[in-house]
Amino acid sequence: MRNKTRGRNTIATLAATLLGGALFAACGEEADPPDGMDGGTDTDTDADTDTDTDTDTDTGYECTTDEIAAQNEAIQAALAEAVPCFTGGIVPTTGGVNAYFMAAPDEDSLILCDDSTPNDIAEAAIELAAVDALTGLELLCIGNSTDVAGGSATDVAALREAIDAVTDPVDPPPDAGADAGPVDAPCTVEGLDDPLLVVVVAADGGVADVHPAEADTSAETAAYATCLDTALAELGLPCLSSMEICSDYP
C-alpha cells in the first residue's frame, strides 16, 4: 500500500542543503530500473555487489574475477566518498551508468512516500550526484548491477528502531513477579492495527512532523501519530533530509 502525502516547499532548500550545484550532471542513457533493488541483481555477497555477468557483451571480452571485484569496489568507494547517503542500484548502460535510489535495501515497512514532490526532487538529486561521482570510471565488468547500502539505509534503520522503542511492549522488570506481563510502551494505542503514517524530515535532518496518511482517518492513528511526533522530535536523520517516509503494510 502506498500513501499520498502533501507536497512541501523544500525545492529551494534541497539544492543548497543536499548536494549543491553538482547535481545537474546528465544521467546518461535511460535504462529500466530493477524491481526494487533485487531485479537482475545478486545481493548475497559480502560487498553487496552483483557478479552474475562477467563478460562485456559489447566486445566479447572476458572479465576476470579480479577485474569484477575491483570495479565493484571502485563504485562503492566513489559513492562512499562523494555521495555517502546513496542507497540503491547502479546499473550499466551503453552510455555509462544509471542510478536508482531507495531509502533502504529492505525498507521493512518504512518506505519513501509515493506521490511526494519533496521525494521526487530528493531522489532525482541524489541519483544525479551518484552518476556524476562515477563518471570516468571503468565499469565494463560490473555485470547487471551493483547494490550500494549507504547512509540513508542507516537512517531508515534508526527511524525503525526509534519507533519500535516507543511502541513495542516493554518486558517487566526482574522483580515484577512470575505473573507479570509486558508493560505497554509509551505510544501504545488500544485498538490500533497497521497505522498508515507519514514522517516528514526537515532540511536539517530533524523530524519536522508525524501525521496520519490521507488514507488513514482513524482516531487511533491520529493519537499514535501525535505521540510519535513528540517521541521522535530529537531524532536526527541527515541522509533523509527533505524527504517523507511512509509506513507501509502488505
Image (cartoon, rainbow, N blue to C red):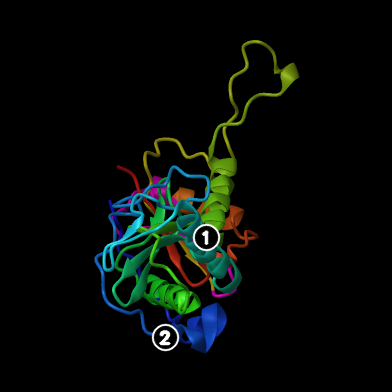
Q: Amino acid at mark 1?
A: Ala
Tell me the quarter of the image containing the C terminus: top left
Of the pair 81 and 173, the residue shown nearer to us: 81
| In-front residue for pair 151/173 | 151
Which numbered tag is attached to residue 201? Answer: none
Which of the two discs, 1 and 2, labels the residue nearer the N terminus? Answer: 2
Which residue is at 56% across, 57% downward?
Answer: 155
Q: Report the side of 167 relative to 24 (left or right).
A: right
In percent of width and height, residue 5 lies at: 34, 66
> Judging from the image, what secondary structure is the residue with disc 1 in?
helix
Residue 152 lies, in percent from the top left, at 52, 61
Q: Which portion, as a residue range, is magenta?
A: 203-222
Q: Nearer the viewer, residue 48 or 163?
A: 48
Query: What secondary structure is marked by label 2?
Result: loop
> Comparing marks 1 and 2, which lies closer to the viewer?
1
Q: Gap between marks 1 and 2, in whole Å?
A: 25 Å
Residue at 58 percent across and 68 percent down: it is 205
Does the magenta segment cover residue 27? no
Say which amino acid is labelled 2: Ala
**Measuring 57% from the left and 65% from the top, which residue is drawn there?**
77
Q: Which mark is residue 70?
A: 1
- Percent x, y for residue 246? 40, 56
The 10 Å Cα crowd at callout 2, few under 14, some 14 to 19, many 20 or more, is: some
Task: Say which residue label 2 marks.
Answer: 25
Asked if residue 174 is positioned above or below residue 186 in the image, the reply reads above
- Displayed quadrant of residue 234: bottom right
